[in-house]
Image (cartoon, rainbow, N blue to C red):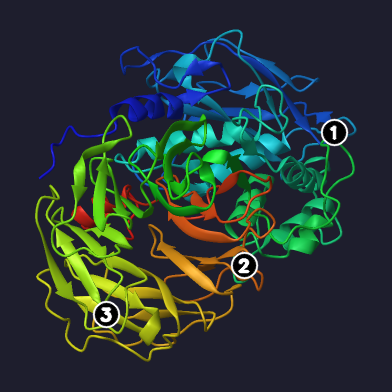
Amino acid sequence: MLNKNFRLASVLSIAGAALAVLSVTGCSMQSSAPASSVAGSNFSGQIMGGGQPIANANLQLYAPSTNGYGAASAPLFTRGVTSDANGRFNFTGAYTCPSPSTPVYLTITGGNPGLPAGTNNTALALMGLLGYCGDLTPSSFFVINEVTTVAAVWALSPFMLDYAHIGTSSTNVQGLSNAFATAQLLVDIRTGRAPGSAPSIALVPTAEINTLGAILASCVNSNGSTSPSAGCGRLFTAATPFGGHTPTDTIAAALAIARNPGNNVNALFNRASTIGSFTPLLAYAPPDWTISLDFVAPDFQQPYDLAIDSQGNAWVLAQGTTSPGSSNISVLSSTSGVIGSYPQNGAAYGHMAIDPYDGPWLTNNAYNSVARLGSSGGVASGNYNSGGIVGPGPIAFDGYGNVWVGNNNATVTKLNASGSSGINFPTNGASAAVDIALDPFGAIWMTDSGADQVEVLSNNGAAGTGSPYSGAGLSGPFGIAVDSSGGAWVANNTANSLSHLTGSGTAVAGSPYSGAGLSSPVDLQVDGLGNVWVVNTGNSSVSEFLNTGIAQSGGAGYGSSMLYNPFRAAIDKSGNVWVANLGTTTAGTGMITEIVGAAAPVVTPASVAIRNNALNQRP
């Protein structure tokens, strides 16, 4: 086994610090104080709705739960707190911090949004993520409005049932903390305006965020009537998903839109209020209401592969910029941008996987080998080339720490965890594996586009019963991902479809699936609830299917306004979907897209999910 302390130490120390920053107070998310309750400091702010102060609104400060996803949050105020006639609040001694490092958020319900005296909009609900409780000081000032609500809801969607039920498991506190930080990239809660504190290489969809805020304002800046012709009634009707529940407040409406971003897009766009101070606004309805960050930098040119580490950083394998035939490895933090970049001169790396200790392993076509990078970004201990590696392609880890490599012929190589020895197995296929994945039982699944089939080997290299598998709608199979039952999902590039195979290689009832914007799909990932996310090169979109095969995304998929020839995808422990794009918005650069809070969180890196038998499970 690898040394348990092996990792890219310098990068991860920076990454940990980067992920620990919440810009709302200018302080670190990590507090040096002991994890015990302390008196909460006073802080102040203003509540705005539709550009108007909200008077007599009820405030509540909550701490998210660590007892499970969507578990009841803990209300912290010990007495009633309301806003004044100008929508302002300032209080002392109203709460106790469970610990200085407890993240907290503020909710606003009811109140008068600048209408005649005595008005109370009971459908009004707004929120903002304040940061860590111990970082709140008398100088902390926050503006809570519709766009802070949008940022909070989209980032926390994977953890949220409603505004009083936001939580995570005790083993994914970091995922929730990272989501809090992501919200601050979108909107600055100190000013209530977009964009927030995103790094300079990030493109924030400010006009879309503002438009979503204006959509909520159509209800917020009203008397709260839910009649069919009233602002709230029209918003709630448009936000109601097919077969779902009708929202009863504006936070619930925002959550319904975030969870169903392709639902009633035009109807929602037409609800945008012209009252208020949100500018700029979208001139036309977008394809969907997903919110994405595009990170654009020279380090990402022509990205070949993408993986997420234990800290939530995206590792990008891209074309090198220093010399012909070289590669570049970079580490992207959504809060800080590129926190590590490692040119690999003379190394034509093609695929990447991260081991359980956050060490990146890469296949090297030029030397018919596999390399493991060390803390300085160089090759840690030479290139591993035992076991008959030839033109290595896709790479993945099994639950025993072994490294599996698909070769450019009908073979696959299994390296031990140290890379020192390996063995070559025939795949019984007709051509090289395009993609590989390991199931919970240690078997390796491979897509063979040349033969329109999937091959399966046991962990000792024996062909799976009935393998290779054909039929089942397989047509130009590219990306493959296994599910927790031991079956597999396959993206069919030439058929614009998605196949779901049982562990014995037969088609699950109803498979193959089509629609949802599938168009020349090349890659796919399965999230923590078993839902499938597929990357489409044909229409530059991402498709979502439930684990039952029911299409969730519309006919155009999701994200087409932000994606440019997407090629690879990964999901992190906050539920963000990361996409590597072969295209870009700026010449001489490459682009990585983060679709905020769209999926269910997963265990990262993927090698840990395999090792812990936690595939398709939330951490």
Q: CA distance from mark 2 to mark 3?
A: 29 Å
Q: Residues within 10 Å of mark 3 (few under 14, many from 20)?
A: many
- Which residue is farthest bottom? 471
* Residue 234 in the image, given as x and y percentages of width and height: 80, 58
Which label sits on residue 517?
Answer: none
Where, by quadrant of the figure, is residue 33 drawn?
top left
* Residue 411 in the image, given as x and y percentages of width and height: 22, 73
Which label sits on residue 455?
Answer: 3
- Which residue is farthest top? 138
Whichever of labels 1 and 2 marks the residue nearer the N terminus, that label is 1
In-image side of 321 versus 150 (left or right) = left
Where, by quadrant of the figure, is residue 238 drawn?
bottom right
Amino acid type at circle 2 is: Gly
Q: CA distance from mark 3 to mark 1?
A: 57 Å
Q: Residues within 10 Å of mark 2 (few under 14, many from 20)?
A: many
Number of marks present in the image shown: 3
Contact between labelled residues 3 and 2, with CB atoms less than 8 Å apart:
no
| Residue annotated with mark 1 | 277
Q: CA distance from mark 1 to mark 2?
A: 31 Å
Which label sits on residue 557?
Answer: 2
Q: Is residue 508 visible?
A: no
Q: Quadrant of the N terminus?
A: top left
Whichever of labels 2 and 3 marks the residue nearer the N terminus, that label is 3
Relative to 532, say whether 593 is above or below.
Answer: above
Write the residue at 83% across / 37% down: 279
Write the residue at 16% across / 62% down: 414
